[in-house]
Amino acid sequence: MLGVTRSVSAPNFSVRSVGSYSSKSNYEANPSLLESQFSEGERFVEACTSIDLFPKRRKPSTCIFRAYVFLLLVIQVVLASLQWVGSTYRWRPQLNAANRGLSVLLLLLSWINLTLAFIGFRRLQFTFPLNWIIFGCMFESLTLLVVCLHILEQDLTWPFVLIGIAVLVVYTLLGLWVPGFLTANLWILILASIVVFLVSTVALSVRLEMRYYVPASVCLVFFGPWAMYNSQKLFLRHKRSRYLTHQYMEASAKMFINYAFTVSGIIFAHRFSVDTLDAHK
């Protein structure tokens, strides 16, 4: 067999060079160069993405939020009180029992639907002008509902309106503070129990008539603690679930609902005690 000879000057490709595989690129040989380029790229991306194309809206402060709530509440209370007193002393619409019942049913259904829609679907509360339209319809439907409930008896008079305002103011102030060692619900129960006990003791000692004692008990047991709960939710955020920044209309609507129910409730309690309890004397 003939042997194959190779020239000395010819390169030998059959032998693999170790250096060809062990040689490193410039980035591998100089890791500092790779890190510097990556850091420059990260700084560039961060600088480009940190531009605030959509500036954040400043959230209103707690004082401004409460000012909105009480401003709307005062407007509602004043307008509703004027309509109630005006319907009793000046307007005096002529309605029979059937028309009154139909009006009450329609107003009650419309008010319930509007209230559930406004409070249940939170998107309605910041959709302008739909939020203000529904808010105004809620207020007027509840105001007219109270008028229709008492228009035949003509007992929606100014003393009951003043009592409702007094209950709202007093229990709103009582809701500003809760002892640190008690929960908010427990404080409401304890305070209501103490007040009811004191009022009952005084009423029995002076032999207070039922026409005064029953409405007072209804206010102390139901409507007063309700107003206190609304006040705690507005002021004591560490004790209650807090309102969001766009829910000032919901907060004022709930406080006005409490006021309207207080006025109507004490009128019903007074009428019931006069017709039923004091009538047997």
Image (cartoon, rainbow, N blue to C red):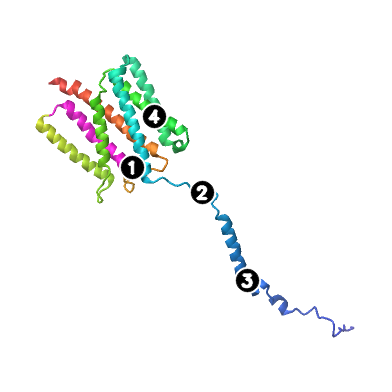
The residue pinned by badge 4 equals 138
Task: Give residue 169's quadrant in the image.
Answer: top left
Q: Residues within 10 Å of mark 4 (few under 14, many from 20)?
A: many
Residue 112 seen in the figure:
no
> Is 164 on the left or on the right of 3, as rendered?
left
Q: Earlier in the sequence, mark 1 or mark 4?
A: 4
Gap in Å between the C-alphas at discs 1 and 4?
Answer: 21 Å
- Tell me the residue at 32%/24% (across/down): 83
Magenta segment, principal secondary structure? helix
**Quadrant that contains the C terminus:** top left
Asked whether residue 224 is drawn in magenta, I would say: yes
Amino acid under label 1? Leu
Residue on which disc 3 sits: 33
Say what secondary structure mark 3 lies in.
Answer: helix
The spot of residue 114 in percent (x, y) is 41, 30
Region in magenta: 208-232
The 10 Å Cα crowd at callout 3, few under 14, some 14 to 19, many 20 or more, is few
In space, the residues marked 1 and 3 are separated at their CA atoms by: 59 Å
Query: Which residue is depicted at the point 39% across and 22% down?
Result: 106
Q: Which residue is the site of mark 2?
A: 55
Q: Earlier in the sequence, mark 2 or mark 3?
A: 3
